[in-house]
Image (cartoon, rainbow, N blue to C red):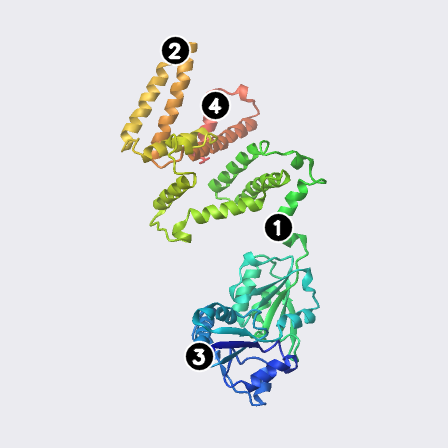
Amino acid sequence: MIKKIEIVGLGAGDLEQLPVGVYKKLLKAPQLFLRTKEHPVIPELEKEGLSYTSFDSVYEKYDQFEAVYEEIAKTLLKLAQTEAVIYAVPGHPLVAEQTVQLLLEYGPKDGVEIIIGGGQSFLDALFASLKIDPVEGFQLLDGTALTASQLQIDQHIIISQVYDQFVSSNVKLTLMEKLPDDYQVYIVTAAGSKQEHIEKLPLYELDRNVSINNLTSVYVPPVTEEEILLKDFSKLRAIIAELRGPNGCPWDKEQTHESLKKYLIEETYEVIEAIDKGDIDHLVEELGDVLLQVMLHAQIGADDGYFSIDDIIEGLSAKMIRRHPHVFGTGKAANAEEVVQNWQEIKRQEKGELAPVSLLEGVSKSLPNLMRAYDLQKVAAKVGFDWQEITPALEKVKEELEEFILELDGTEEGMRRAKGEFGDLLFAFVNVSRFLKIHPEEALFETNEKFTRRFRYVEKMVGLSGRSFEEHTLKQLDQYWDEAKLKGL
C-alpha cells in the first residue's frame, strides 16, 4: 500500500470559486479531513452530503498556533499509515498554510507521499478586490508570527492568518512600531465571495473590529509619506548615498576615512556625556550621530569599491554568533566573566593558533592614554602581574609623587625627568582606580564637567560684578568657586 496524503484547497470564498476537480474530489472522498470547517463552501457542500472530520477542536487545546499545527500534521501522518487521506485547507495548500509545510517536511521521514492538489489562493481575489498590482512589490506575512523587522513599508503588505482579536491586537502593535497610530489600513474578509467585506480604518482601531475571522486579512498600503519613511533603514542608506552622490553635498563628498576620524571620537564622547547626564533624548540624537559616522565610512567604502554597509553588518552578525556559542550553539557561560573569557579565547583562535609576541598586543595604541593605561594593567593583571590588594598600589602613588617632586629643581634636565615621573604618577593612579573599580577616563570626564560648571558660575559672577577677571584677586575668584560648590555645581 502506498502511503499518501493528498492536500486540496477550498478556495478563497464561495462554492463558485472552487475548481471542478476539487469539488468532485471532496464529495467522493471516503475519509475527508478539514483543518477548519469555518469556511463558506462547507455549509453549501454539507447540503450535497459532504462528510468530513474537522480539526477545530484542536485549536481549543493550545495557546500557541504552532502546537495546533504540529498536532494536526502528526495526526494526519499517523492516519496515512493505514489509509489514504484527503486533507482540505482554506485557499490554496501552498499559500499561508503551516500544516502543509509541516507535512511536506515530515512526510518523507515517515514514508508518506504528500500530494498537492488544486485550489484557488485568496491572493488572486484580494488583489482584484483591492485593485492592486503585485508587480509593484508586495509582502505576504503571517499575522501569528509578525515582527517589525519583516516589514517593508514602501511595499504593499498583506497580513494573513488574522483569526481573532488577539492576533489582530498583536498585528496592530507590531505595525505601530513602524507606522503612525492613525495610518489607514484595510480589513478584508472573504475576498471575492458573496460575503466579501472590506473596511478602511485607522490602525489604532484594528483590534476593535468584530468581523475578524479565519477568512480575514489585513492590507497595509505602501507608505509614500517622507516623514514616515524616515524610520526605515533603507531610507537612511539612500540619504547617505545621495549626500555622497554627484549632486550631493560638497563637504560630504570630500570626506575620507582619515578626515572622519576626529568626528567619530567627538561623537562617541558626546554619547558618553548624554549617558552621564541621563538625558535620553540627547542620547538618541548622539547615537544617531555615531551611526552617521558608520554610514559615511560604509558609503566611502562602497564608492571606492571595497566594502558596503552590508559587508559590515554581515561581518558583525557572523562575529556575534561565533563569539556567543552559549546563546547560538552548545557552549556554556554561567556569568559575565565566563562570557568574557570565552570571547577572548574564541578571538585568539580566530586570529590563529600562534601565540602573540606579547600579551599586550591586543591593546590599541589609538586609545586615549588613560584608557590605554587601564587596559594594559588589566591584561597584565590577568596573568598575575598585579598586587593582591590596594595598599601597595597606594604606596606606589606616594612613591611616584615624591620622585616627581624631587625632580622639580628648575633645571632643563630635571624637567625632562619630571615629565617621566609625572607619567609614572598618572600610571600609578590608574592602578588604584582599577582596585576601586573606577574607570579613570570616566572619572576624569566627570571632573572636567564639574570644573566646566563651576568655572561658568565664576564667569557669571564676574560678569554680574561689572569688573573684569583682571580686576579680581585670586581670593575673590576662589570665593565664587566656593559658592558654586555650595550650590552643588
Camera-nearest residue between 429 and 290: 290
Camera-nearest residue between 411 and 355: 355
Residue matched to label 3: 79
Q: Could you tell me residue 255's position as x and y percent?
A: 63, 34
Residue 409: numbered disc: 2
Q: Mark 2–mark 4 contact, CB under 8 Å?
A: no
Identify the secondary structure beneath mark 1: helix
Task: Using the rendered view, name the quadrant where residue 261 is placed.
Answer: top right
Amino acid at the residue labelled 3 = Leu
Q: Could you tell me residue 205's position as x and y percent?
A: 59, 67
Amino acid at the residue labelled 4 = Gln
Task: Using the rendered view, name the quadrant where residue 128 is placed.
Answer: bottom right
Q: Is residue 429 above or below residue 21?
A: above
Label 1 Cα neighbours within 10 Å, binned few <14 / some 14-19 / many ≥20: few
Residue 370: numbered disc: none
Q: Could you tell me residue 126's position as x and y percent?
A: 65, 71
Give the residue displayed 66% in from the left and 60% down from the top.
137
Give the residue displayed 34% in from the left and 21% down from the top.
400
Give the residue displayed 66% in from the left and 40% down from the top.
244
Q: Mark 1–mark 4 contact, CB under 8 Å?
A: no
